[in-house]
Image (cartoon, rainbow, N blue to C red):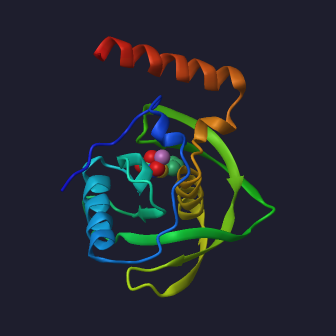
Amino acid sequence: MIYQILTIPNKILRERSEEVTNIDRNIIKTLDNMAETMYAAPGIGLAAIQVGIKKRLVVIDCDYNQETKKNPHYFINPEIIWKSEEKRSYKEGCLSIPEYYEEVERPSKCKVRFLDKKGITKELDCEGILATCIQHEIDHLDGKLFIDYLSRLKKSSIEKKFKKSNKRKN
Ligand code: GNR
Ligand code: NI
């Protein structure tokens, strides 16, 4: 099942998602649907809050393209337990802020702790696009968007644009 993706200025995107306490059939189904939604979008990552589900669930597949097999990575209650001093800048996009891309500087490497689908605690060393993407997704779980890192001028102009475009639709 493909979920509908919420876009700014929807206030749900600003809420903090809740920890998952029990990995039941419903959670597994939600993760599978999130992956389907991510591939359909298409995107390289998706946080549950982007489809209106306020749970700390993330799916990522950074190296998917038409020639490669799908290889979704599922993260339950992910947290960053280490980040590098070294930073890198990457032109980010977000399915909740369609067709807008801007450079964002973040730690170039990080270590993430999470539960897998079986409820086993795992740790993963991330670098490159995966490091950028997992930080972007964990931000979503805390109600944060990549435009929050931009200048006030850039942020307010993009917010204004999306407020207007929503008015035209309604
Ligand atoms: O599809 C996505 N691409 C992307 C590119 C650079 C940095 C982060 C991302 S994540 C984004 C999908 C999305 O909005 N996830 O929350
Ligand atoms: Ni996003």
| In this picture, residue 1 sits left or right of residue 106 | left
* Depth order, front residue of 110/116: 116
Residue 86 pos. (x, y %): 78, 60
47 above or below 11? below
User: At 59% across and 52% down in the image, what residue appears?
Assistant: 142
112 above or below 152? below
User: At 29% across and 16% down in the image, what residue appears?
Assistant: 170
| In this picture, residue 7 sits left or right of residue 3 | right
* Depth order, front residue of 88/153: 153
Residue 135, located in which quarter of the rendered image?
A: bottom right
Q: Total of numbered circles in the picture?
A: 0
| In this picture, residue 60 sits left or right of residue 168 | right
Direction front: furthest residue: 21
Direction left: furthest residue: 1
Locate the N terminus by quadrant.
bottom left
Q: Is residue 47 visible?
A: no
User: At 74% across and 55% down in the image, what residue appears?
Assistant: 87
Q: Can residue 84 be seen in this view?
A: yes
Residue 53 pos. (x, y %): 38, 53
Residue 57 pos. (x, y %): 44, 64
* Depth order, front residue of 30/106: 30
User: At 52% across and 70% down in the image, what residue appears?
Assistant: 77
40 above or below 93? below
| In this picture, residue 108 sits left or right of residue 65 | right
